[in-house]
Image (tube, helix red, strand yellow):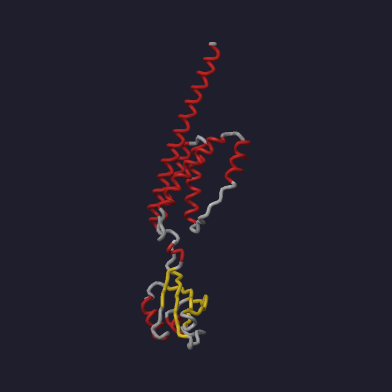
Amino acid sequence: MQAINEIFKFNDIATKATISEVVITMAVSFMLSLIISFVYKKTYKGQYYSQDFVHTLVIIGVVISIIIVAIGSNIARAFSLAGALSIIRFRSSITNPRDIAFIFFVMGAGLATGAGLLVPAIVFAFILSFLIYILYLTNYGVKEDKYKTLKITIPENLNYEGLFDEVFESYHLDYKLLSVSTVSLGTLFELVYSVRTTEGVNDKEIIDDIRAINGNLNVSLILDAQTFE
């Protein structure tokens, strides 16, 4: 009888220890994920900020840490979880490479935390967060020369081939005609150019010179997709 009580006592202690480890792991992973998501929010420069994505970063970090705790050193359990996760399909696609990098960031912190490497996980999260913030402050990687999309509407009776070459060359623009399409039931043409402007070039002057040729029809100059995202 005493032996049975000792067994139950031992199991109770083991259960309490396991629960405490899980709670500590979740708490550390949650705090690190919060820090990572805060860095993402502070350094985000795009136009389409998503609060849901910030919440997702926090959730992923905690979930990954618990998955690692659940797997432990059990290979069979690892393969079972891999098979279960392989059936999950995501409807939303991530187009910004920076968002993907932050997902790997929280996954790395979650993996280290779940494996019990709390100090390396904390050091990793703080150092990489600091480096990301340095990149943000220094605006590392920006180019002074910017590619833009230029859309010009012209009447159907104008020959669009080489129509604006003289204007582009007068401003020393690097340009390329990307597409030609009809609009307004075929009564107008829309030309889409990729142009690269240099510092000191006035966009308004370029647009005014183009409007003098296309009969004051619509002209739009749009920054490239990377600027918005």
Residue 145: x percent and y percent?
44, 69
For residue 47, what is the image quadrant?
Answer: bottom left
Residue 39: x percent and y percent?
40, 50
Q: Position of 42 compared to 99: left or right?
A: left
Name above or below for residue 60 compared with residue 157.
Answer: above
State the residue lying farthest toward the top. Answer: 1
User: Which is more toward the observer, 139 or 42?
Assistant: 42
User: Which is more toward the observer, 130 or 227?
Assistant: 227
Question: What residue do we see at 45% from left, 37% from top?
Answer: 26
Question: What residue do we see at 50% from left, 38% from top?
Answer: 66
Q: What quarter of the picture does the C terminus occupy?
A: bottom left
Question: What residue do we see at 49% from left, 41% from top?
Answer: 63
Q: What quarter of the picture does the N terminus occupy?
A: top right
Residue 18: x percent and y percent?
49, 28
Residue 172: x percent and y percent?
44, 79
Number of dots carrying numbers: 0
Name above or below for residue 152 compared with residue 95.
Answer: below
User: Which is more toward the observer, 162 or 155?
Assistant: 155
State the residue lying farthest toward the front. Answer: 185
